[in-house]
Amino acid sequence: MADRAQQIGLNWASPLAGFLPGFLAAGFLVLLSLGTLAVVAMNADGLGGLGAADLAAVQFTISQALVSAVISVVLAVPVARALARRQFVGRRLLIVLLGAPFILPVIVAVLGLLAVYGRAGILSDLLVWLGFQRLNIYGFSGVVLAHVFFNLPLATRLILQGWQSIPAEHFRLAAQLSMRPRDVMRYLEWPMLRAILPGAFATIFLLCVTSFAVALTLGGGPKATTVEVAIYQAFRFDFNLGKAASLALAQFGICAIAALMAWRLAAPARFGQGLDLRVQRWDCAAAHQIVFDFCILAAVALFLLAPLAMVTVEGALGLPELPAAVLPAIWRSLWVAVGSALLTLALALALAQAVAGLTGRNDRQAGLLEAVGYLSIAASPMVIGTGLFLFLFPLVDPVALALPITALVNAAMALPFALRSLIPAMRDVHQNFGQLADSLGMSGWHRFRLVIWPRIRPAAGFSTGLAAALSMGDLGVVALFADADTATLPLLLYRLMGSYQMAAASAVGLILVALSLALFWGFDRGGRAYAMS
Amino acid sequence: MIRTTLMAAGLALTLLGAASAEQKPILNVYTYDSFVSDWGPGPLVETAFEAICDCDLKFTAAGDGAAVLARVQLEGARSKADVVLGLDTNLTARAAKSGLFAPHGLTPTGLTLPTDWDDPLFVPYDWGYFAFVYDTTRLKRVPRSFEALIAAPEDLKIIIQDPRSSTPGLGLLMWIEAAYGDRAPEIWAGLAPHILTVTPGWSEAYGMFLKGEADLVLSYTTSPSYHIIAEQDVTKAAAVFDEGHYMQIEVAAKLAAAPSPELADLFLDFMLSEAFQSIIPTTNWMYPAVMPKAGLPKGFETPVSPDKALLLSPDEAAAIRNGAVDTWLTALSK
Amino acid sequence: MLCLEKITIKQGDFHLSANWSVAAGQKLAIIGPSGGGKSTLLSTIAGFVVPQSGRLRVEGQDVTATAPGARPVSLLFQDHNLFPHLSVAQNVGLGLRPDLKLNQAERDAVQSGLERVGLTGMSGRYPAALSGGQRQRVALARALLRRKPVLMLDEPFAALGPALKAEMLDLVDEITRDTGATLLMVTHDPEDAKRIADVTSLVSGGVAAVPVDTAELFANPPEMLRAYIGS
């Protein structure tokens, strides 16, 4: 009887109880992003004022983020379409590889980009050989180039998901109605894009807003200063915590406005459920379409993979120079990556479960929870790290907790990406199987094990893999806390570069790329294995 | 109930005290990343000092010098740091103002800095000259002054670091201030077309230079020494400028709230000894503050004569810093 | 015995009231125009929709506030009756234990349930490999094993051909006869009602009418029913 009462409590009579983990996760995220900001501001006796240079940083931040996001998204549309409607050998591998730039450590990616597009890059050499001038990408264009390099893969991924959400039946219907490609675009693909693009645009805009090292390295000068860089400088150069807190608030403001606009612009697409038939297309068999698709795929693959190839070659050359310290660093990084990925998964599951469960029952709460899940994308890792340091220092030795804290912050940073794929998957389960599970009295752990987990496993695998890869490559807050004995791979890479060990640093970069991709591939694969439609 | 708890706590504390009494005392030194790396001086310094102190020397690394200072400022009086190692004269004014540091009480003798030193708080342990480094196989017409650099064809490109996030970046700012004073804005305006990009730190800039992105990179006169001694590569050289070269002097200091003040004093003293100073050149790639008996290794010769050394006093540097950054921002934002 | 005591349901503009009961073992057809609230009525009895007022009793027990899984009813939906990632046997087994930890006796019961609905030897298959009729047979087998006093069908056979639908209705008829369950069946086809329902309730104009004898109802249809069947 007690058993039964509990079932009721969890599932039905008091639905909030079942969403408790979601609300706890949300509370934790608010503390981590806004709480740390408050701690920093309190230590500075309030917020500091912003000067002309800070406002210039805000302006540059917004303009470069806008251009980067527009280019990434616009380029991603034909790429995603080509990937969605063409089947060829190595398609899956190409999709995984195209994702690589997104998880590359920034400094590795920048050096890879320069090896191709820099003044001394192979493209410049080619141009000189053809009798042209060397490329000069430094400045606004360099920042945008780097951001497109990082974010085009993400945009492609998001839009590709949209394409795959159009049921196969719709394309069959289109074929029956002898729709021309332009009609298919108008009636099937455009409504999907209309629903997907604002979100994809906003995500990339936010990532470019909070971008750090890239802007400075390829920016060509102090004009290229993002808000995140200004935060860093407020800490380091002036030790002005109040100003850092103000800038972090400004960054939250920009992100909030962008998110709000995306939310207003996004029109939800209603395609209904298909029967998971394999998508076959009848509207894109014309020769010029095939040529166009493969040309755009080849161009993008070349654009994204050439720097990656340079990273690989230079890394391979540096392998003999690897120091002994690399092995323990690999272990540490793997632990941090896997730990933070599992933490991301736990947070994302709790939030997605609550968001999906509350949808239709209490849409305001659902929306609020979802928004909190995306909060960390607008947070400054520098502020989070410093806030945590100030908070923890009186209680424990932050150095002893360097790795767990790094894992924790990385988990929060990867959460928005995990939610992007888990919330829709969870909503599907609730919509399609919620009533059936309720009527069979399935609740708690068994409901999760038998109904939810098997349905969301692919999304969970993808999210966990992405989180692990992002955590692997991110320097994160470890630099604030670590001592000589707790270096992760990215920190080791920076330390090697700081000690003239450029060859060894390249090799560490290659190891980072390989491990990040392997982690992503492993989790993603694990999620798909045995998954049934 | 409360009494039992208190007794238990007391017992635990006694046991803890007994346990730590058996261990060696610990000296905590906060420093920058590259000091403690496997190629830096850290491991050798640790061995050498532990041989004489009967203690456990522990390094904690936090980014670069500015990050180390920020770290102890964040920790405040509760910091467990005994010694901070790795500030330079651009940071010492801020460090002194924080009130966190205690006088060293030493009267350093035999310093071989090209300048006098009588700071009561900070002990110098090495120094260097900022310089533009180039590749002798690629750059044939090497500029010998800022004015020559400005006059060079516009496709002669240099990479510098941001003065707000990097030590050499701030060094260049002070270099031009010390050499040109009121003419600094004009010099910066002339340099602007030659500046390929401004990086957040030294590593990015030097890495890009080695890849061939630019003709010159802001670094140290000792950078070519590294390539000669560690890599037997003689193709890198520092361009010697007629205006003279700005110095960086790296210093250490004892925290006023140091948990082990005696060990901290011992360490500061040790820093000026032969054992420490002979480690510095080929691990930290800077000139020793006290010339070791064996002199400098071949390839480490200073190309700058001491009368060309430029240095602003810490107070001067602190006073003009914000104005100099604004000048720089204005010149480069056009 | 299923009692709807002054039940009122309100969802935005939509409202529906019902105040009647069905005797144990009786078969009730619910008929009426689309959008009239037939499915909502079943959803309310199943516990997915909370009535604004009134009480719901099954065999004398008040279940108005009981969770869906704890109610003494089984409901077959139009679709999504099966979990696509679970096998036929697992889908049926859920009727016995929601955590699927079945003992040997329960596994045997699953097999005999599948035999009863004519799916011998299909236990290892997955729903994707079954035809539409077979899928609903699996759902019926599960309802059979759950042995709830009330079985409700929300047009699960609407997509099947006439012969197959008749076959399935006969199977439902047999099963309810075996278990003694009360049957509530939503349909838009008067023939379905005539085939197995003892009594029929017309849901229209915001009211679920008191059930009356099916044969009498169709022999002498009221105005609203005539409008619906178009005679």
Image (spheres, coloured by chain):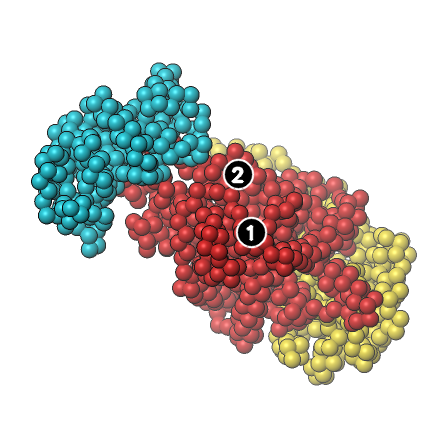
**Residue at which label 1 appears:** A84
In this structure image, what is the colour of chain C?
A: cyan
Instruction: Give the chain letter at badge 1.
Output: A
Is any atom of residue A194 visible in this view? yes
Crowding around mark 1 (Cα neighbors within 10 Å: few <14, some 14 to 19, many 20+) is some
Q: Position of residue B205 (x, y in %)?
A: 73, 63
Instruction: Give the mark nearer the N terminus: 1 vs 2.
Output: 1
Front one among C230 and A257: C230
Q: Position of residue A17 (x, y in %)?
A: 31, 41
Q: Position of residue B116 (x, y in %)?
A: 77, 68
Q: Position of residue A456 (x, y in %)?
A: 46, 41
Left or right: where does residue B3 sit relative to residue B174? left
Q: Image height check: is B313 above or below A14? A: below
Tag on residue A173?
none
Which type of secondary structure does the marked residue at label 2 adopt?
helix
Above or below — where is A133 with respect to C30?
below
Chain A, which colour?
A: red
Chain letter, yellow: B
**Disc 2 marks which amino acid?**
Gly
In this view, the residue in front, A301 or A226, is: A301
Three-letter amino acid code of the residue under disc 1: Ala
